[in-house]
Amino acid sequence: PLILGIETSCDETGVGIVRGRTLLADAVASSVEEHARFGGVVPEVASRAHLEAMVPTIRRACETAGITPADVDAVAVTSGPGLAGALLVGVAAAKGLALSLDKPIYGVNHLAAHVAVDTLEHGELPKGCVAMLVSGGHSALLAVHDITDGVVPMGSTIDDAAGEAFDKVARVLGLPFPGGPWIDKAARDGDRLYVRFPRGLTSQRDLERHRFDFSFSGLKTAVARWVEAKRRDGEDVPVNHVAAAFQEAVCDVLTRKAIDACKDRGFEHLLIGGGVAANSRLRAMAEERAAAAGITVRVPRPGLCTDNGAMVAALGSELVRAGRAPSPLDLPADSSMPITEVLNR
Ligand code: ATP
Ligand code: MG
Ligand code: FE
């Protein structure tokens, strides 16, 4: 089946088109530059940008895929979680499209879509895997048997998300927003062992209660303190080294807990998704440590890790393939859609 997916949960207007598990088009228009000077996404600005970008982005995706909207078998759209006003634009557009084409609509979970997108790169998902979702708003370990049935949360961050930590530390270091890619870049010429920053929730005591949970706010504060102290002493801040040492701390905890989660469930596959999965050090470290533990890592190419429409189309395609009934045409935008709910019914 030919599925068109629409994503507008944050600041990317994404329209993806897939046939089965084959990606035909992935058009993304980002309003990130409009938010940069505020140091974070401004919801009202994002909603307006989605409104302006929606129709041109749908057009661009159809052109790239060499289809017309009438060829589409189903429309998938992110119905949550995300910014309420931003989600509304995508949901309204998807409803209009589905109604005018007389095709079913699937209102899907953005977080599950970050997992499902890997089907476009590596085919069918393994029967039983741990999915580590690391993005701007979430950091979670999930047990997944069949993504169309939902996910079982194993643990999550108790404070900041991993991507949020990247963005905040980047700000402290004077790097642009969003900071993840900039830290990744700066860290390439840095010494990962320059400072040893704290690894949250890894002490024996914390592990008893928070074996699969994360905490990044202490790390963020530790980096900020370290940088302030240097500046107070009138010393130069070695941005590359700090970026590398911070990134090392995040990746160390993420990969350790992800592999532990696989062992706990007896799963041989670890899937990584979300914007932070684009991080080069995380990818390398996960590969290395998983291989040592006999676990296979699946992580989509960086362009599919950050928000896009292809991931929504990919999840829609899995739901259609599994014979799931579509959402009602009055499906809502649900800004706090729980991670356990894959499809809005
Ligand atoms: P959510 O998916 O939780 O709703 P979101 O949609 O804002 O949040 P994504 O687009 O999935 O998030 O991810 C954006 C986050 O990923 C940002 O915090 C960004 O800094 C981070 N990120 C992107 N590329 C990298 C990278 N190479 N290294 C580290 N972090 C990165
Ligand atoms: Mg974004
Ligand atoms: Fe996302």
Image (cartoon, helix red, strand yellow):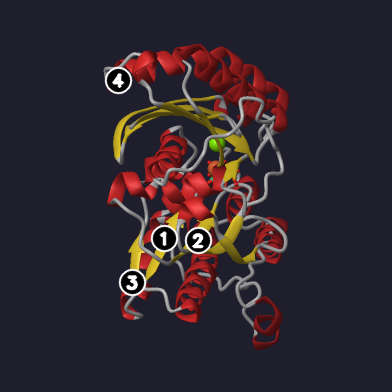
Q: Disc 3 or 1, which lies upstream in sequence?
A: 1
Dot 1 and dot 2 residues touching (CB under 8 Å): yes
Disc 2 crowd rating (10 Å Cα; few below 14, some 14-19, many 20+) is many
Q: Which residue is mark 2?
A: 132
Residue 64 disc label: 4
Say which element carries label 4: helix
Q: Which residue is mark 3?
A: 288
Q: Quadrant of residue 297?
A: bottom left
Residue at 59%, 58% (x, y): give it.
Answer: 139
Dot 4 and dot 3 residues touching (CB under 8 Å): no
Answer yes or no: disc 3 within 8 Å of ligand 1: no
Q: Which one is in front in this view, the residue at disc 2 or the one at disc 3?
A: 2
User: Which amino acid type corresponds to the residue marked 1 in the rendered image?
Assistant: Leu
Give 37 or 286, whichever is nearer the viewer: 286
Ligand 2 shows up in the quarter that is top right
User: Which amino acid type corresponds to the residue marked 4 in the rendered image?
Assistant: Thr
Residue at 69%, 37% (x, y): give it.
Answer: 334
Residue 193 disc label: none
* Residue 290 percent across, percent down from the top left: 36, 73
* Residue 168 percent across, percent down from the top left: 65, 49
